[in-house]
Amino acid sequence: MSVIKLMRGDITRLSVDAIVNAANPTLLGGGGVDGAIHRAAGPQLLQECQTLGGARPGEAKITHGYNLPARWVIHTVGPIYRGGESGEAETLSRCYENSLCIARSYGLRTVAFPSISTGAYRYPIEEASRVALGTIDRFLRECSYYEMEPIIVLHTEGDLQVYIENAEEMGITYEVQR
Ligand code: APR
């Protein structure tokens, strides 16, 4: 069974099968990692996104990567954090689950995730990292026949440390890629 890789870096620079974008329901770009991905991919990404018809929180849709080193971009819409009592954890988990299911259906192996919803959408990274790690770990165990190599790319050292500490606490097998 594969392990979850954790690293600090810029997701737009990764030469992987797919990177996951923390998008908004329009799927037409924004700030944060969404803005960085669109800037790096070039205008054709937006053109393809305009054909998708948006997405609801928890859903995921795939496009080509264009000028990115990644071949594909999986756009998913995370929940806006409203205190944790409005189903945010379930929605966030669906972002990871649906992105991994799309990757599997396309026969992709290396899939890199940002820390979805922990920026503009204000999801506390302590809780969000547990949802992310738990969902990805469960997918790897349930689909152990399929060699998926998930990577979580943190933008800061501090965020990386939170994921490492929670992976340890949850007893999840991981590897830090420096
Ligand atoms: N590589 C990896 N991670 C990044 C990068 C990058 N280049 N840029 C930002 N991040 C990290 C942030 O530090 C944060 O931990 O991505 C995480 C998600 O933050 P946001 O990009 O703000 O995404 P989110 O919190 O899901 O909010 C989505 O913001 O950009 C808009 O259009 C987007 O409306 C949507 C909302």
Image (cartoon, grey):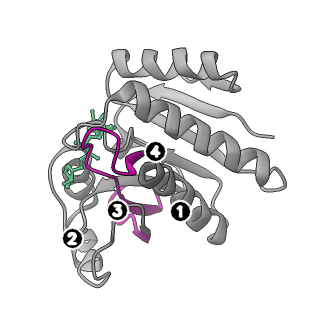
Element assignment for label 2: loop
Residue drawn at point x = 52 percent, y = 50 percent:
16
Residue 141 placement, left or right of 18: right
Residue that extends furthest to the right in the rendered view of this protein = 145
Label 4 belongs to which residue?
A: 113
Kind of element beneath mark 1: helix
Whether ligand 1 has any atom under 8 Å from the Cβ at mark 3 is answered as no
**Which residues are the magenta region?**
61-89
Q: Residues within 10 Å of mark 4 (few under 14, many from 20)?
A: many
> What residue is disc 2 on?
26
Nearer to us: label 2 or label 3:
3
Query: Residue 57 has which mark?
Result: 3
Q: Which mark is residue 143?
A: none
Q: Is mark 3 on a helix, strand or loop?
A: loop
Question: Which x, y percent locates residue 96?
Answer: 51, 52
Tell which tag, 4 or 1, sits nearer the viewer.
1
Which mark is first along the chain, 3 or 2? 2
Q: Is residue 49 above or below residue 57?
A: below
Query: In the rendered structure, which amino acid carries the disc numbered 3?
Result: Pro
Front one among 118 and 10: 118
Q: Quadrant of the N terminus?
A: top right
How far is disc 2 from disc 3 in space, using C-alphas? Answer: 11 Å
Measured as percent of width and height from the top left, residue 153 is found at: 44, 34
Please name the amino acid that badge 1 sits on: Asn
Dot 1 or dot 3: first in sequence order is 3
N-term mark: 4 or 1: 1
Q: Residue furthest left?
A: 31
Instruction: Name the foreground residue: 63 vs 83.
Output: 83
| Disc 2: residue Cβ within 8 A of ligand 1's nearest atom | yes
Q: Which of marks 3 and 4 is nearer the N terminus?
A: 3
Left or right for 80, reference 159 = left
Q: In which quarter of the image is ligand 1?
A: top left
